[in-house]
Every structure is written in structure tokens, then in C-alpha cells.
């Protein structure tokens, strides 16, 4: 699920599988006659009512990947729909990216508390986001205390995360939103075949195909990964992270020269991405260019 997954996982660094799981979690989301928008995950009888402000914030964050510009829409979504836990989870991810750990801790707890209330009317999503909230709180412990000390402290909270996810699965294990989160969790725990199956049941399409591309990439099934990422690009709103992912897959295939223009395409949208991610894309782009003999076309390296 976008930068919340990969950037946080990358910044936490070398840790155990449970530690990597925390990265995924940080990825990881009143009028009398309200207007409702389309549920991005479900259709038909299973669709949930969702405010237009929430739908707009979701699209800005995940479809377009305009992370730096998404705060305003997320704040509008929180005001319009204070009972929606996904909004607090996405605000927590932004707070982490911005280094505001005090806000990150507060929003983690708010995610869990709002989700606990939602369980009364929507047990599936309530349990799902209660699990996300526990995961965010566990991530906060690790960030605050470090991996060596923090991870053992976080284990009880992680157990609550897994219990909440199991409760959501008991309601409907085929739910697309639940499968999207489970896919990323399984992927970072290196259960790649299982993750692939989860992503196939996920929605919306641009996130489902993105997850499949990541799973295929990690399984070194690069042609299938390229097919999946192309489908994600076709279904998305020009999310620069998808061009970055396609470039990574081409590099894995030894096609550095073909990858460089895709790295460049992602970097053209650097203003909407977190600076650590921009620096990572730039570094991988430079290495691919050097390997393919394109050193004369290297852009200026961003200043620290």
C-alpha cells in the first residue's frame, strides 16, 4: 500500500521478520442527508458508505501517490468523517514520514480507539483497523526504544494485532480490504505465494496489481511482475511509485538502460514524494545509468 509500506520498512532497517511487519502497518490509512462516494474496496451489497472527502483523500494518497499534498484532504476527511479509522492511520503514516513522532504516537492510538468503536456497527473493518492501530502502536514502541529493546516490548501489542486480524477474517476472509493488508503483511514476512493469493482477492485494481507485481518481483518471476505493474499503471492515476517499481523490475532483469527513463519519470514527481524516497530512487537511477554507460546523462545529485 504505497510509501507507507516501503519507506518505513526501509528506514527501520535490518530487523527481524516481526520488525519488518511494523513497516507494513505504517504503510500501511455531518449533514442530515450526507452524500456518499463509491467504496474503493467493495461493490454491490458489500459496499460501505463512504464520504466523498474520505474517497478523495484515499485517491490522493494511494492512486496518485501525492503524499506531500494529501494532508489537507486527509484533514478534511477527518472533519467530515471522524468515525473513519483509515483516515487516522494515513495521517499517522504522514506523521512518521515527516518525523513527527509525537503526532505519530497520538494518531496510532486514535486509529485503534476509533476502530474499536466501529466494531459495533462494522465488525470486519472495526477489527481490521483495530489491528492496524495495534500495529502502529507497536511500531511506535520500536521507533522510540530501538529494535533491540523495543521489539520485545512490542510483542504483546503485536499479538493483539494478530488477534484483531483473525477476528476480521472470521467475519469475511474474502474481503478485498482485508486481503490487501494481509497481502503486504505476508509479503514482508516472505510468505510470497500466500501474499500473491491475497493480492489477487484485493481491491482496488491499482493496489491489487501493485501488490502482485511486488510478489512476483520477490519471487524472481520478472515477466509476470512486469505484466502486473503495467496493469497497475493503467489502472492508477499516474502514481510515480509504479514507474519506480517497474524500473526496479527491469534492473532485476538486467535491463538497466530501459530502466533509467522510468526512474527519471518517477523523479519528475519528486515534489510529491517524501525526500528519503526521492533520494533512494535517485541512487538506484544513478547506479543503473552507470552500469549502462549513461553516466553523461546523470542529473545533479540532490544536496543532503
Image (cartoon, grey):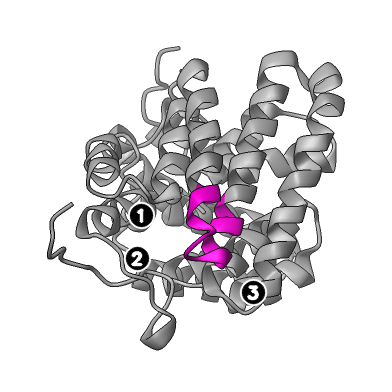
- Along the viewing direction, whichever of 20 and 161 lies nearer the viewer: 161
Residue 115 is tagged as: none
Q: For residue 18, say whether it is visible.
A: yes
Counting the numbered discs, the total is 3
Residue 83 sits above or below residue 126 on the image: above
- Write down the residue under mark 1: 239
Disc 1 element: loop
Q: Earlier in the sequence, mark 3 or mark 2?
A: 3
Q: Are marks 3 and 2 in contact (CB under 8 Å)?
A: no
Residue 20: where, in percent of width, then height?
Answer: 74, 40
Disc 3 element: helix
- Write down the residue under mark 3: 171
Q: For residue 295, say whether it is visible.
A: no
Residue 58: where, in percent of width, then height?
Answer: 34, 54
- Tell me: 87 left or right of 293: left
Looking at the rendering, the stretch of residues picked out in magenta corresponds to 115-129
Residue 267: where, in percent of width, then height?
Answer: 36, 40
- Along the viewing direction, whichever of 128 and 233 lies nearer the viewer: 128
- Write down the residue under mark 2: 236
> Between marks 3 and 2, how big is the CA–CA gap?
29 Å
Q: Are marks 2 and 1 in contact (CB under 8 Å)?
A: yes
- Tell me: 274 left or right of 226: left
Amino acid at each position: 500500500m504505497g510509501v507507507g509500506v516501503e519507506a518505513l520498512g526501509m528506514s527501520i532497517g535490518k530487523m527481524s521478520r516481526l520488525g519488518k511487519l511494523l513497516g507494513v502497518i505504517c504503510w500501511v490509512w455531518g449533514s442530515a442527508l450526507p452524500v456518499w462516494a463509491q467504496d474503493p474496496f467493495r461493490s454491490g451489497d458489500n459496499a460501505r458508505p463512504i464520504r466523498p472527502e474520505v474517497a478523495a483523500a484515499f485517491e490522493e494518497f494511494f492512486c496518485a501517490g501525492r503524499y506531500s499534498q494529501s494532508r489537507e484532504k486527509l484533514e478534511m476527511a477527518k472533519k467530515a468523517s471522524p468515525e473513519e479509522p483509515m483516515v487516522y492511520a494515513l495521517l499517522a503514516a504522514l506523521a512518521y514520514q515527516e518525523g513527527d513522532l509525537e503526532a505519530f504516537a497520538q494518531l496510532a492510538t486514535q486509529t485503534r480507539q476509533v476502530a474499536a468503536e466501529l466494531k459495533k456497527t462494522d465488525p470486519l473493518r472495526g477489527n481490521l483497523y483495530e489491528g492496524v492501530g495495534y500495529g502502529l502502536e507497536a511500531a511506535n514502541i520500536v521507533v522510540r526504544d530501538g529494535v533491540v529493546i523495543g521489539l520485545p516490548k512490542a510483542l504483546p501489542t503485536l499479538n493483539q494485532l494478530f488477534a484483531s486480524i483473525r477476528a476480521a477474517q472470521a467475519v469475511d476472509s474474502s474481503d478485498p480490504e482485508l486481503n490487501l493488508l494481509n497481502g503486504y503483511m505476508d509479503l514482508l514476512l516472505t510468505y510470497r505465494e500466500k501474499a500473491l493469493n491475497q493480492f489477487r482477492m484485493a481491491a482496488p485494481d491499482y493496489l491489487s496489481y501493485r501488490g502482485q507485481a511486488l510478489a512476483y518481483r520477490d519471487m524472481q518471476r520478472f515477466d509476470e511482475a512486469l505484466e502486473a505493474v503495467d496493469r497497475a499503471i493503467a489502472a492508477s492515476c499516474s502514481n510515480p511509485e509504479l514507474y519506480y517499481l517497474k524500473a526496479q523490475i527491469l534492473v532485476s532483469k538486467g535491463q538497466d538502460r530501459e530502466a533509467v527513463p522510468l526512474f527519471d519519470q518517477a523523479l519528475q514527481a519528486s515534489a510529491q514524494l517524501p525526500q528519503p524516497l526521492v533520494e533512494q530512487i535517485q541512487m538506484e537511477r544513478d547506479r543503473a545509468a552507470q552500469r549502462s554507460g549513461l553516466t553523461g546523462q546523470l542529473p545533479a545529485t540532490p544536496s543532503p
